[in-house]
Image (cartoon, rainbow, N blue to C red):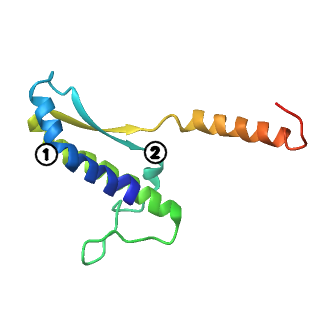
Amino acid sequence: MGVNCLAPYLLTKLVEPLLIRTAAISNPLSVRIVFVVTLMQLGTPCGAMAFTKDGHPVVRESAQENYRQSKAGASWLADDFAKRFGPKGILSVVREYELCHDMFRLLMKIELTSWNTEDGDTA
């Protein structure tokens, strides 16, 4: 929750006055808040996020479920900020992270290079 929900929320609240001032002197909707999500949130259990009676997110048993829940939370934040800041000229959007495939290929290349050079050869 911290990285995908709390951190973006706190950062946005911190820079809110700057966003509002900038939007007032900028082209319409050129000031943006972008939340990065993945399609993995589609596997989130029904209801997207579960909360305890006192309003805290439920920590699930699986790390994947917690990750999916946090990404769903990021989508909720984007929606909430769109409603709050849209009238002030600030666009809040969700961007699906499509670079993961390129990152995976790069990491595999690095891993293969590392594996091939373990016996002392250089790549």
Left or right position of 17 against 42: left
| Closer to viewer: mark 2 or mark 1 | 1
Q: Quadrant of the N terminus?
A: bottom left
The answer to which quarter of the image holds residue 115 is top right
The residue at the far bottom in this view is 53
Left or right position of 42 against 14: right
The answer to which quarter of the image holds residue 38 is top left
Badge 1 crowding class, 10 Å Cα cut-off, few under 14, some 14 to 19, many 20 or more, is some
Mark sitting earlier along the chain (2/1): 2
Residue 111: horizontal and vertical position, in percent?
Answer: 74, 42
User: Which residue in the structure is indicated by mark 1?
Assistant: 84
Provide the secondary structure element on which disc 2 rests.
helix
The residue positioned 32% from the left and 57% from the top of the image is: 6
Depth order, front residue of 109/22: 22
Task: Tell me how far mark 2 sits from mark 1, CA to CA.
Answer: 25 Å
Q: Quadrant of the C terminus?
A: top right
Residue 82: horizontal and vertical position, in percent?
Answer: 19, 42
Amino acid under disc 2: Leu
Residue 79: horizontal and vertical position, in percent?
Answer: 23, 46
Position of 96 relative to 53 (above/below): above
Amino acid under disc 1: Arg
Q: Which mark is residue 39?
A: 2
The residue positioned 12% from the left and 37% from the top of the image is: 20
Position of 23 relative to 74 (above/below): above
